[in-house]
Amino acid sequence: TGPWDGPGMAGLYARWLSHGPRFQTLTGIRGIGPNNLCADIVASRPEEFVPVAPGTAWTLDPGVFDGILQLIWIWTRRVQDASALPLSLKSIRRFAGADMSGPMTVDMTFKSAADDPELDVEATLYDAAGRPVWLIEGIRGWSQRNLNRLSGGWQGGVRPAAGAAGSSRTEA
């Protein structure tokens, strides 16, 4: 894995991705290689998506899950100059004792060849203490250059950092 030398998160969300603030959970790309990617991600909160009682927690965080799928898009864009849509997945394992809040790290392994449009990906999500949170196996996808036209569709900008003045996450 080499260091990431591509666009920063604001550039990725503005030009390569098309996600509004609720789904802008990626906070940085650490490194990328022909068969892997490592990135930082932050958990969302249930009250950002649905009216729930205070103090509830996600069993499966939709913002983090979608962020993992966004990383597949970023990897294919960088490595293949294409974009990928997910088609299916085999399993998601959630580990007990891990913290599903705050900052986390995602390590992804692309099991298919770097130039293969048929993707087979495995992702492991770790909490801030390095404990595994999820293991997602058998993420299948397909990449094509003509999907690059779907990039940058949400023009509302990038959400402010968590806790920043004026932070609002009312747009999807």
Image (tube, rainbow, N blue to C red):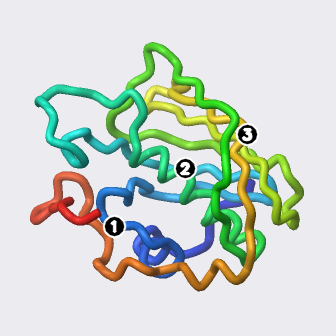
Q: What's the residue at 11%, 62% (across, down)?
A: 165
- Label 3 neighbour load within 10 Å: few <14, some 14-19, many 20+: some
SS under mark 3: strand
Inspect the image, locate mark 2, and give the three-letter code of the amino acid beneath it.
Answer: Ile
Q: Which residue is mark 2?
A: 68
**Residue 134 left/right relative to 129:** right
Where does the image place residue 57, in percent across and percent down from the top left? 28, 28
Where does the image place residue 14, in percent across and percent down from the top left? 42, 79
Q: Which mark is residue 20?
A: 1
In primary-sequence order, the first of circles 3 and 1 is 1
**Residue 81 left/right relative to 23:** right
Alpha-carbon distance for marks 3 and 1? 27 Å
Inspect the image, locate mark 1, and give the three-letter code of the amino acid beneath it.
Answer: Gly
Which quadrant does the C terminus fall into?
bottom left
- Answer whether labels 2 and 1 touch (C-beta < 8 Å): no
Q: Which residue is mark 3?
A: 138
- Answer whether labels 3 and 1 touch (C-beta < 8 Å): no
SS under mark 2: helix
In primary-sequence order, the first of circles 2 and 1 is 1
Q: Is residue 14 placed above or below 168 in the rendered structure?
A: below
- Label 1 neighbour load within 10 Å: few <14, some 14-19, many 20+: many
Q: Is residue 40 placed above or below 15 in the rendered structure?
A: above
Inspect the image, locate mark 3, and give the three-letter code of the amino acid beneath it.
Answer: Gly
Q: What's the residue at 75%, 69% (across, down)?
A: 79
- Label 2 neighbour load within 10 Å: few <14, some 14-19, many 20+: many
